[in-house]
Image (cartoon, rainbow, N blue to C red):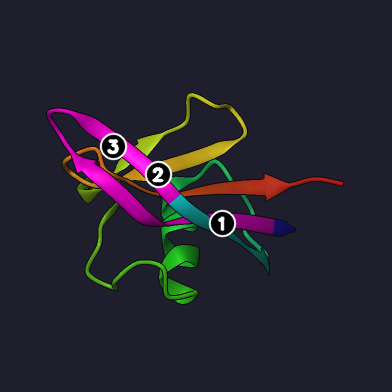
Amino acid sequence: MKIQVTNYFDVWGNKQDGWVINNQCHDDFTSHILDFWNKKSILKFLKRIGYLKKTIRVNSIIWDDTLMSGYELLDKDYCPLFFVEEVRK
């Protein structure tokens, strides 16, 4: 399966006024995640590719799946970190 991670590497703002994604890049990976909608599987994948520290747990980040095509991950202040989606072609 192909996974695309959109890295929001330049984000400005704050929790009160909101966040602005100033710049981003897309990285494509091939993975054998059995269940893309399983947060633990996604978390393990993101740790393996170096996007998250090994100490991060499922409940220590916010998982927004309202776009229905993947997960947008946010920190505790709702600052967007990145978007993870399964690419189907």
**Residue at (21, 49) in percent of width and height:** 60
Q: Which mark is residue 19?
A: 3
**Relative depth, front residue between 61 and 57:** 61
Image coordinates of residue 40 in percent, x first then y, are 41, 53
- Give the CA distance from mark 2 to mark 3: 7 Å
Do labels 2 and 3 touch, CB within 8 Å? yes
For the residues labelled 2 and 1, the Cα–Cα distance comes to 15 Å
Nearer the observer: mark 1 or 3; the answer is 3
Going by the image, does 21 lie left or right of 29? Answer: left
**Circle 1 SS class:** strand
Q: What are the residue bounds of the magenta stretch? A: 3-22
Q: Earlier in the sequence, mark 1 or mark 3?
A: 1
Amino acid under disc 1: Val
Amino acid tagged 2: Ile
Question: Which of 69/24 is in front?
Answer: 24
State which quadrant residue 29 falls in: bottom right
Q: Which residue is mark 2?
A: 21
